[in-house]
Amino acid sequence: MIAPFRIGTTSFVYHERPARADGGGSWLANVERLAGRVDDVEILLFEHGEGPDADEVAALAAWKPRADLSYTVHTPLDASLASEDADRRARSIDWVWDAIERGRPLAPEGYIVHVYLGDHEQDTAPADLAAWRRRAAASLEALLARGVAAAELCVETLDYDFAHLEPVIADLGLSVALDVGHLDRDGRDERAVIERNLHRTRAIQWHGVDRAGRDHRSLVHYPADKARWLIDALSERYRGVVTIEVFREADFEESLALVHALVARSPGAAVSRRSTR
């Protein structure tokens, strides 16, 4: 099924040998199984210092022309770019930059970064939001100064009102990674956030939330009416990456089938396909 946007998933779908310390299969082993089935793979560098070595990166890069594959790179989760602790901010800039450097040979569509309200998700909002924005802006500017293009740096929607950070993103000319799974999980007005940010979005991360409240599950857990609206809107207006952001094979297979079925029934996708012939 040809979609007008690039359908992707994560580099943690298959858990097999050769294995990493956390039990996941290697980045290359995942890409070898995903090539030809998806258009993009989100290379997850969740832990500082974690990542494929130079030989594996070269092998990953070789899959791009072979399978018409693109990559996005997710930088470490423990990086805290707006921390009140100046030393932690400095370390976090270094950690994100290390991930950018590791992923650079892949010429990725974007580098995804987190900016927390505190040092982690679910932290409470700082008393001084203006000071928080200044800290976030300074860290993001430091990354730009090291040589990453502003459009390649994608700030992800997390567990807070993204409007708090949108002025910084606009001022610096950054891109956005819209995690619509997070927006649904947290009861946000998804359509409003999407409408405000789709023009600067390079990656959309999509996953469901199961009955136990666990996210990054199959899209069968994502509300059907929202899924229909999302696919129609993206088919008409979006040409970036839509990442099925799940970490288990069963969730991936179920979600990929659902996305293909939604695209097949989308009038916007049909028009887009005809217009590119």
Image (cartoon, rainbow, N blue to C red):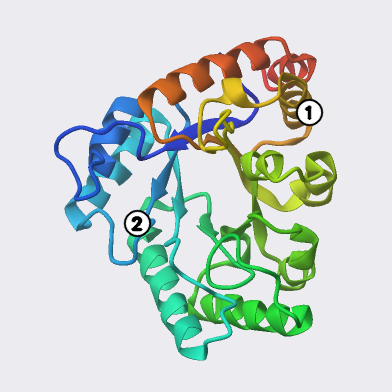
Density class for disc 1 (Cα within 10 Å; few <14, some 14-19, many ≥20) is some
Q: Is residue 37 visible?
A: no
Name the residue type under label 2: Pro
Question: Split into 4 quadrants, where in the image is the N terminus?
Answer: top right
Check the picture and name the quadrant holding the C terminus.
top right
Q: Quadrant of residue 160?
A: bottom right
- The answer, for residue 133, to whether it is visible in the render is yes
Task: Tell me how many marks there are.
Answer: 2
Closer to the camera in the image, 62 or 78: 78
**Quarter location, residue 117:** bottom right
Residue that extends furthest to the left in the rendered view of this protein: 18
Q: Name the side, left or right, on which 3 lies relative to 200.
A: left
Distance (Cα) linking label 1 and label 2: 32 Å
Residue at screen point 79% across, 48% down = 193
The amino acid sitting under disc 1 is Glu
Residue farthest bottom in this picture = 86
Tell me residue 190's x, y (percent).
78, 41
Answer left or right for 21 relative to 258: left
Looking at the picture, how far across and down is residue 126, in whole percent? 70, 77
Residue 84 in the image: state x and y as whole percent: 58, 85
- Locate residue 275 relative to residue 61 in the image: left or right: right
> To which residue does mark 1 refer?
236
SS label for mark 2: helix
Which is more foreground, mark 1 or mark 2? 1
The structure residue drawn at horizontal position 82% and vertical position 43%, both measured from the top left corner, is: 189
Q: Is residue 208 above or below residue 203?
A: above
Q: Earlier in the sequence, mark 1 or mark 2?
A: 2
Label 2 environment density (alpha carbons within 10 Å; few <14, some 14–19, many ≥20): few
Q: Is residue 218 above or below residue 31?
A: above
Regarding mark 1 in the picture, which secondary structure is present there? helix
Residue that numbered label 2 is attached to: 105
